[in-house]
Amino acid sequence: MTLEEQVRSNRIRSAMLLLSFGLVFVGIGAAVQAVYGGAWLIIIATIAFVYALISWFANGKMIASWTGARPVAKDEYPELVRAVENASIGAGLEQAPQVRVVDDPSPNAFAAGGSPKSAYIAATSGLLGMMDKRELEAVVAHEVGHVRNRDVRLMSLTAVLVGVVALVSDIALRLAFFGGGRRRGGGNPILMILGIVMLILAPIAAFGIQMSLSRKREYLADESSAEITGDPEGLAMALQKLQLDKTELRHANRATAHLYIETPLNNTSGARSALSGLFDTHPSLEARIESLEKMGGFQLPALAGQ
Amino acid sequence: MGGGEPASSKIQPPPSRPRIIAGIVVAVYIIAGVVVLIAIWTVLIFNHLIRLGNEAKKGWSNIDVQLKRRTDLIPNLVEAVKGYAAHERQVFDEVTAARTAMQQASGPAQAGEANKQATAAIGRLFAVSEAYPALRASENFQKLQDELTDTEDKIAAARRYYNQTVYQYNTRLQSFPDLIVAKLGGFHEREFFALDSPAEAGLPNVDFSGGAAS
């Protein structure tokens, strides 16, 4: 599969994602209408349509406000801006994406937005403090890789859509259980059960979509980084530093987790890894470092105590 | 549909004239179909080669921009150092000669050689400047040093992209079906820019096959 095919497949997936988002909300609307009666189906479907439209055009801005990523000038962060410029040249992008910084001590980075022209790359202040020039360039090249592969629109859309599906079905479920006494008309019990099952399944499906997206894309972006910088070892060193770090990102949540270069939520490692593998948005850093080592034909010194 | 058994287990008659004509028509359709397919296929290859060639051109213009920036910065650097170390004539000459070579280079291969020469000469100039603390403390010099390091990084990044696209383009031009289209369409292989080893251009290339199944 070539880059063009990957780009095309990402475009199709973005459209499919919007479509299935619409279907999920028609389902939720039908479920709510079954439980409460009224014209909920049309109301919820309309709101979902408007939200999908806004998401398509403004997902980058939405994610920026959720994560606290603010645009920065070159004078303020010359090294970061240069790293983004250089990686964009190496990736053959028409222009370098915008650069943003999240003021947070936990080291992490992500890319968000739509087309390469409207996308941006965000790094936390913690990342900038921790990485040397070579490592920073490798991490930035990973994010530029997402932009070049056109992963960003799909991943950003997933973030804004998955978040709202989980939120809405959560609210609807709470209402169904705790506000049940006040409902009008008392609908068909079979329909009600179906509706509740629907509300439980919707967020699971949403997280399923989110997880299916992100894991392989991380490996691909790691490879892209190596291609852009010609330095897989730099990225492996950066990932090893992230591995040692256990701080959590303040503004991260389940919906945006898959955007980051490293999972921003649970930094507890060890025994739980076998089970948690099912719900992780990222492959383990160990596995990613190993595949970079294979690619570049080098071996990083093992971490003490791992 | 009809009620009775049709009494039609006759021996096949020799093909009549209308049948022969029908056969010819089918053959013509098949040939026309094959010709159309080949035409479409040729156009697709042609467009692909054009696109790869444009990518390579874009990659080259990225390098060219940075090479120009570098040649613009060099005289400023020489002036800045001269102010503090006027007698280091030999290094200045080297740098200036490298700059002239960069300006006169025609084509990526020559430009690559000239650029290597300039990198070495600028490196020596910076080494010389180590001996002059006042020079190294000057803001102007620091800024120039910073800018030149940046152009060097950007040339390296642009070089990688350019050489990768040229590698892809040239490989297509050399391989079988594209070869014919390339000959007919007047496509020519492009020069690499300062390629250190042949393996450098081809490796590593991202394989997206894994991403398809997710």
Image: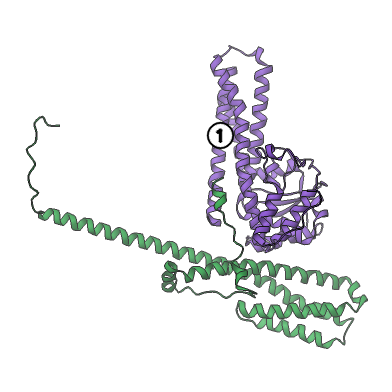
Chain colours: A purple, B green
- For the point 43% across and 74% down, which residue is it? B183
Q: Quadrant of residue B3?
A: top left
List the residue tagged with mark 1.
A22
Q: Position of residue A7 (x, y in %)?
A: 56, 52
Marked residue chain, label 1 = A
In the rendered image of this protein, does residue B58 appear above or below residue A294? Answer: below
Q: Count up the numbered dots.
A: 1
Q: Nearer the viewer, residue A52 or B178?
A: B178
- What amino acid is labelled 1 in the image? Gly
The C terminus of chain B sits in image quarter: top right
Q: Is residue A264 left or right of residue A149?
A: right
Numbered disc 1: secondary structure: helix
Q: Position of residue B101 (x, y in %)?
A: 68, 83
The answer to which image quadrant residue A94 occupies is bottom right
Residue B20 drawn at (x, y percent): 14, 56
Which residue lies at the image location 56% right of the left edge and 21% below the top edge? Answer: A194
Q: Quadrant of the N terminus of chain B?
A: top left
Q: Residues within 10 Å of mark 1 (few under 14, many from 20)?
A: many
- The answer to whether A169 is drawn above or below residue A132 in the figure is above
Figure quadrant of residue A36: top right
Residue A266 at x, y percent in the picture:
75, 40
Residue A38, visible in the rendered structure: no
User: Is residue A136 shown above or below B132?
Assistant: above
Residue B179 visible somewhere in the drawing: yes
- What residue lies at 80% left-to-right and 44% top-to-bottom? A246
